[in-house]
Image: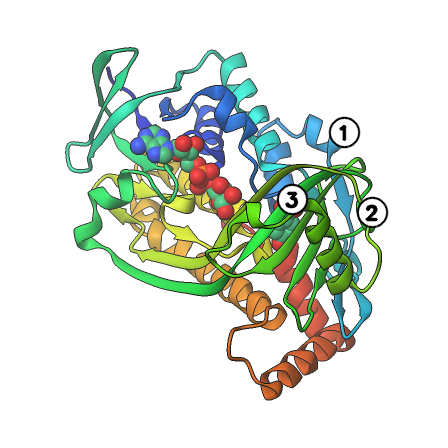
Amino acid sequence: MRTQVAIVGGGPAGLMLARLLELRGIESVVLEARDREYVQQRVRAGVLEQPTMDLMDEVGVGERMHREGLVHHGVELRFAGEGHRIALSDLTGGRAISIYGQQEVVKDLIDARQASGLPLYFEVSDVSVDPDAPRVEFTHEDSRHVLDCDFIAGCDGSHGVCRPAIASVLTEYHRDYPFGWLGILARCRPASEELIYCHHERGFALASMRSMEVTRMYLQVPPDEDADRWSDEEIWDELDRRFGMEVNRGEVFEKGVTPMRSSVVEPMQHAKLYLAGDAAHIVPPTGAKGLNTAMADVCLLAHAIEASYGGDDAKLAAYSERALERVWRVQHFSWWMTSMLHRFAGDDDFQLKLQLSQLRYTTSSPAQATALAENYVGLPFAA
Ligand code: APR
Ligand code: PHB
């Protein structure tokens, strides 16, 4: 087999890259380890930045997002028992975010790929990549395949094979946070019209949603917490305590603990292999940046690959450097939000006062509120 770009991983990064390449007349083959059902059901993030919404429109898959997504023009920061609204759109010249589950984005991109009749293989196994050849080998339906290509896109997430294949040339930067998030999905109206990020002495809490009928809530918990140790009742009671109000309750139909960590590898490329999305970097979910940063990477990569076929290799050579500028901005923002809102083991009262001061400043100074808002709605994707 032969193609121009072999894309390892059919998550948001791999599927969006395939779509961007298709629209530029560049061939690709997408290889996904899981089955279609699994990738479409997997519960992940739910906030699309303005540039991600714009990208969905640009590649012609934004129709259902506009119909079913919930556009939000603000978020609330809650601390010392009071809510303070950050007017995202007023502070950013009308930019906004949309609540639209990652699995919905994945569904829309898979549908578009299949409508175009282009190759997307599910349930591939034993994937190996040779970044120099370049070549990808994999097993599909009991047959071994060799896929020769011009470029390999490593979009296979944080547990994939692409990053390990070039580990010897990579420097890894890590930060583990000493807590996790216990998250639930429940059938009830959201606690509020907009998301609430809540600082509390007992720990952080977040009120989010998937629709006006499905609420998504999170509680800061110890990093190795067993979700089953919490009854639904205990979760709701703790949410009420931290938010300082009675939140709407309903049937809990999904419960799990998300670890909180940051990591970045540099460079994001070696030989003919280019990493994008979670394969190259992870952020804690506090800034809602994981999916959006993956989209920013593949946007840049698609432009660079297109330029390369047009005879200009400079953009591809500079891919990692350009991508990492935005990646580190997002890392900083995610770290800043996380540090401001969570209680760390061993924090003293001095630290608590510093956090409250920062929160007060962020919600009262237009300059500081604007800094939060422009990062939250998403800094522009580099073209
Ligand atoms: N071969 C083929 N596919 C693989 C392999 C492999 N060896 N290993 C993993 N995969 C697949 C996974 O099953 C998954 O569908 O690669 C895909 C990677 O998708 P994601 O993990 O969703 O990563 P990405 O596309 O970079 O999306 C950005 O950021 O914060 C997160 O929640 C956010 O998952 C989102 C991610
Ligand atoms: C979510 O709805 O899952 C969500 C929202 C905002 C975040 C993280 C997760 O910062």
Q: CA distance from mark 3 to mark 1?
A: 25 Å
Q: Nearer the viewer, residue 334 or 196?
A: 196
Mark 2 in CB contact with mark 1 (< 8 angstroms) = no
Location of residue 45 in the rendering, given as x and y in whole percent from the top left corner: 58, 43
Q: Is residue 332 left or right of residue 34?
A: right
Q: Callout 3, which amino acid?
A: Ile
Label 2 lies in ligand 2 vicinity (Cβ under 8 Å): no
- Name the residue beneath numbered marker 3: 184
- State whether residue 102 appears in this view: yes
**How many numbered discs, if any?**
3
Residue labelled with disc 2: 248
Question: Which residue is more in the foreground, 323 or 46?
Answer: 46
Is 247 above or below relative to 337?
A: above
Are there few (<14), some (14-19), or many (20+) residues within 10 Å of tag 1? few
Image vertical order of residue 225 relative to residue 161, above or below: below
Q: Position of residue 4 (x, y in %)?
A: 30, 25
